[in-house]
Image (tube, rainbow, N blue to C red):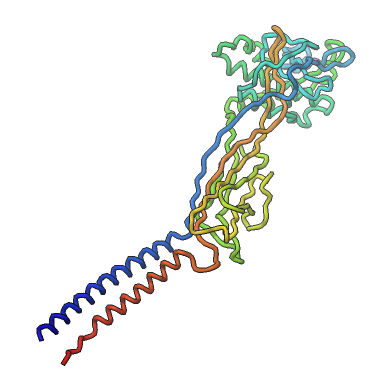
Amino acid sequence: MEKIYMDDNHSQKNKSWLFNFSIVLSFAIAIFAVFSLATFGVVMNQGTDAISYAAPAGTTGDTFTMDMPLIEGQNIKVQIFDEESNGGNFFNVPLYYANTTHTLPVFCVEHSKNAEHEAVYTKDGVVEDYGLLYILNNSAANGVDLVGDAIPDGYKSYANALITQTAIWVYLSETHADKADHASHDLSQENLNVIKNAKRLSFTTGTPGTYDLSVADMNLYNTYIAPLVTAAKAASGVKKLSVSINSDSLSKTDDGKFYLSDVITVNGNPAKDLISYDVTISGVEEATIVDENGEALSATNITPGKKFRVKVPAEKVTETVQTATVNVKGRFNTLTGNYYTSGNLQKVVSVTGTTTDVSDGVTVEFVGAPDTGMNAAQTIYFIGLIVLLCGVGIVYANAKPVESKQ
C-alpha cells in the first residue's frame, strides 16, 4: 500500500508541473502573437526643410556692347517732373540695353558714375543683393508691365524701364547709406525730392525741349516706384520646398493587389514661384506614384497643388520593413544676374529669367505581407491559440477527481 501511494503522489506532481508549464507557455506565445499582429502594417515618414537660392552665371555672354535707344540720331530721353510745366524740376533717366533690338534691358547701379553708348562691358561678378534681384524679377527686367494702360504701347517698354531704373537707384541709395560703397549709390536730396514728388513722365525723341509724349497726374512715385522699393527691402532670397504626408496609415486597393500610402503634399515658398515638381522613389521595388484618388500620375512636371500617394504591389511587401524614400525636386522661377563693368564707367546689371531647383522629401515604411497565404504573425498567433487550448485541456483533465484504485 505504501508503494502504491508514493507512486501516485509522484504522478500527481508531474501532472501539476506539466500543467503550470503549459499554461505559462501558452500565454507567452499568445501574447507574442498578439503583439506581432498589433505591430503589423506600421508606416512612418520623415521630412526635412530644404533651403536653397542661387543667382547663377548670366546668359548674355561674357561681354556685350552697350546700346541706347535712338530715333533720328537722338537718344530717347526720359524725364520725370515734380510739377506740370516743362520748366519744372526734373530727373533724367538714361535707358540702356545689351542688344540693338532693345529687348534685353541693362540697369545701372552706380548713379554717381557715367555710362557710355557703344562701350564694351565685361562680366564681373554675380548679383547677390536679393533686394536688387527682387526689383529686377518684378519689373521690366523680367518682362513685367508695370504701367498698364497708363502709357501708350509705343512708349510702354521705355516707361517700364524708367520705373525699374529709378526704383533700383532709390533702393540702393537708401539701403547702402551706411555701407562702404554708399558714395557710388547715393542720390542727392534734390534728386530724391523730385523722384518722390513725381507727377509727370515725359519722353524726348527729337530736338531737345520738345516732347513726343507727356503724361501728367500719374502719381508716379507712390503708384509705381515706392511699392517696388518697399517690397525689395522686405524680400528674402530663400526658396523653400516642404513635403509632408498626412498620416502613417496604409490602405489597399479594392482588388487587394496594391498598398497605398496616405496622401503626400508638396508646398513651395514663395508659392507663386513654384513652377512644377518631379518625384523619384527608391528603396522599395516597383514603387510608383498615383494621384490622391489612385489614378495614374506622371512623376515629372507635376502641377503645383497636385497631391500624390506611393503605390507598391502587394507581392513586393513582406513582413520585413522596407523604406521607400520619396525625393521631390521643385522647380522655382528665379533670376540670373551678373554685374558688368567697363573701365571706370558705371557698373551695370543685365538679367534674364531662369529657374532654380530645390529638393525635399519624406520616407514611408512598408511592412506586411501579400494576401497569398498565412503570414508569419498569423501563424505564430494560431500556434499560440492551439497551445493555449491544449493548456485548457490539461487544466480540465487535472481538475477531474482521481478514482481510487482497489
Left or right side of 252 for 14: left
Q: Residue at x 53, y 52 (%)?
A: 246
Instruction: Give residue 263's position: percent from left, percent from top.
Output: 57, 53
**Residue 217 seen:** no
The answer to whether 178 is drawn above or below residue 133 in the figure is above
Q: Quadrant of residue 206?
A: top right
Front residue of 387/259: it is: 387
Quarter residue 115 falls in: top right
- Residue at 59% x, 56% y: name it: 312
The residue positioned farthest toward the right in the image shown: 72
In x, y percent, where is residue 173? 61, 15
Relative side of 360 to 353, left or right = left
- Identify which residue is drawn at 17% across, 89% down: 404
Drawn side of residue 363 relative to residue 307, left or right: left
**Horizontal and vertical percent for residue 342?**
72, 10
Quadrant in which the N terminus is drawn: bottom left
Vertical relation: 23 (above or below) 265: below
Going by the picture, which residue comes out furthest to the bottom?
Answer: 406
Exactly how many numbered labels are in the figure? 0
